[in-house]
Amino acid sequence: MSLLLLFTSNALAYIDPACQDFVDEGGRQFYEDDQAQANFMANYFGLTTSYSGLHGAVPHDPGSGAISFEAAGVPPLSCERRLVLGTTKTEDTNKTPVVPRLRLSFAMPKLGPAVVYGSVGYIPPVPFAGVRNVILSGEIGVGVPLDSGLELGVRYHHTMLKTVGEIATPFVQGDTAYDDFFLGSSLGADGVVSFHRDRLTPYLAVGVMDVSTFFLVGDDAYIADNTQPYVGMTTSLGLQARVMKKVDLAGELYSALPPFSAEARDLGAGRVYTGRLRVGYVFGPSPEG
């Protein structure tokens, strides 16, 4: 999952043939400078690997949980968003359309009117396309189901992403390549409202999230600072469904909205609109109804 092909001044000056006409025509609406492009790409991959709920305000019946597989979409970046080095180079960021993740979740028995739950998500360090990626995520939340079927809740989530491998390619093709190091972190809190009816639970989550990144170039130990880390609102509009008693499905439209900072918004320092899916095997009590 070679997602994070970021850049510094020692990257190979190469234009993707698919982008050559765009560059020749002077397309650079969002291009301010290399720093702004670096900020955007660093934030982008922090946002696309964030840990949204993919569930309603009460994810499972009390005392039950699920082992799930999820896939988060990674929309390909346009030629314009991949330009660096004064628009003389494009970065090869579009390596995969999805981020997969394993998830283990559990809802505690009821504490009065509330259900406390948590989950962890993980991608092991399996080498792919010359890099090793590790993603570790977690959430903890509380939901209150009402007799009407309405459910209200809040959740906190945190993700750590680490990539080791050749990320910034040598400036001169054929030169020795060294492993680089990328570290990304996203954390935030959401308010969640859902409506549970039989086996279907539509939900809406609205929250605030922060993304921080660190990038070390192995060739010369250069540290690429993210001068506009993302802080902004996120939303998830989705549907959770229980099928066959032991299969839990969920799908959502996820968005990280333009950041709060006016300067970051002007430079387009971060935003994402994508879809996410999850399928899980439920353990514990059978669903109500």
Image: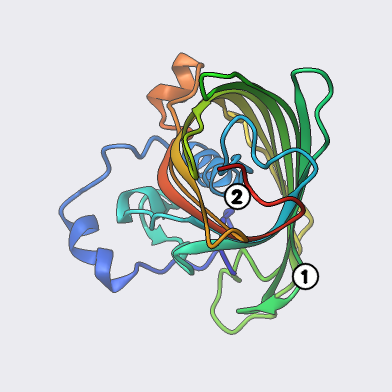
Query: Does residue 64 lie above or below 260 as drawn?
Result: below
Q: Quadrant of residue 111?
A: top right
Q: Which mark is residue 49?
A: 2
**In the image, farthest residue toward the bottom:** 174
**What residue appears at the point 67 percent right and 22 percent down from the top-left corner?**
154
**What residue appears at the point 63 percent right and 36 percent down from the top-left corner?**
226
Circle nearer the N terminus (1, 2)? 2
Label 1 SS: loop
Q: Is residue 123 left or right of residue 250?
A: right
Cα distance in 3D space between marks 1 and 2: 15 Å
Query: Does residue 286 lie above or below 58 as drawn?
Result: below
Residue type, numbered disc 2: Thr
Provide the residue designation for mark 1.
125
| Rendering coords of residue 255 (x, y %) | 44, 36
**Mark 1 touches mark 2? (CB < 8 Å):** no
Label 2 SS: loop
